[in-house]
Amino acid sequence: MSLRTKLQGTGVAIVTPFKPTMEVDYEALGKLIDFIIGNAVEYIVSLGTTGETPTLDTEEKFDIINYTYERVNNRVPVVVGVGGNNTREVMENLQSYPLEKAIAVLSASPYYNKPSQEGIFQHYKNLADASPKPVILYNVPGRTGSNISAETTLRLAKEVTNIAGIKEASGNMVQCMHILRDRPEDFLVVSGDDHITLPLIACGMEGVISVAANCFPKDFSDMVRYCLKGDFGSARPLHYKCLEGNDLLFAENNPAGAKAFLAEMGIIKNVLRLPLVPLSSGVHQKVKAYLNK
């Protein structure tokens, strides 16, 4: 069974809760995992960008991965984020990280270096060769500074056997449609943009890897399931119900928005590691008002 079948629906790129002392708060992480799974999402993504991975050391990453497996306890699949802009180092990480219980690896395109399309292709080809698990590409030009073109995505999908899918967060609907039209039959394509998940599923995507589903897992995953069944009449009200919340989630930075929501809901503390800081008081008040509605 391909990832296109196994990872239909809503995946959640979970935040990493911290204590006021800046240590990882495993009790809060457990509460968050239980909250998300209890509200019917299909899978969890550990150590995505939303998890503030640039501020975690290697020991913390290993501990978070292992704790997540233990707490999830096979209730849903787990995808693990393993990325970076040093290809050799990422290859080494793919060999050393505890990936035995993961269904796949999500790997963001190299940031800051701004490689050519050939460089991006060779980066992922080498990662796929090194990875013990299928690799899901992650295209997020707003963070990395470079775009994985539709042509490069399709070339990887067709030429590299261990490349199994893509999280597409370019926001470019035309690029997404070219990928969806020409992809191999078993190639997974999911949205990386919460705001436009509904129209992207209408175009043919299998679902989403979401930030919003940290905070609104039931409404968001219900919306995605309605979309996948073609019931857009039922999906649209949920889409618009979540719209203002999505705006607030990304008003300043991610995951400051998600952590503000989750703190107000009593699940985690509103603590981020520098260089990220909590939402400004004005936006935080809007979060409180939205939740009160």
Image (cartoon, rainbow, N blue to C red):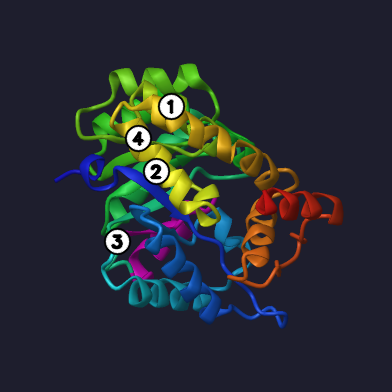
Q: Amino acid at mark 3?
A: Val
For the residues bearing labels 2 and 4, Cβ distance under 8 angstroms: yes
Which residue has dot 4 on it? 226
Residue 58, position as x, y percentages in the image = 51, 73
Q: Secondary structure beneath disc 1? A: helix
Packing grade of label 3 (10 A; few <14, some 14-19, many >=20) is some
Which residue has dot 1 on it? 200
Q: What is the distance, in whole Å, between disc 1 and disc 3 at their CAs?
A: 24 Å
Viewer-nearest of labels 1 and 4?
4
- Magenta region includes residue 89: yes
For the residues bearing labels 1 and 3, Cβ distance under 8 angstroms: no
Residue 169 appears in view: no
Q: Amino acid at mark 4?
A: Tyr
Q: Residue at x 47, y 16 (%)?
A: 174
Q: Amino acid at mark 1?
A: Leu
Which residue has dot 2 on it? 222
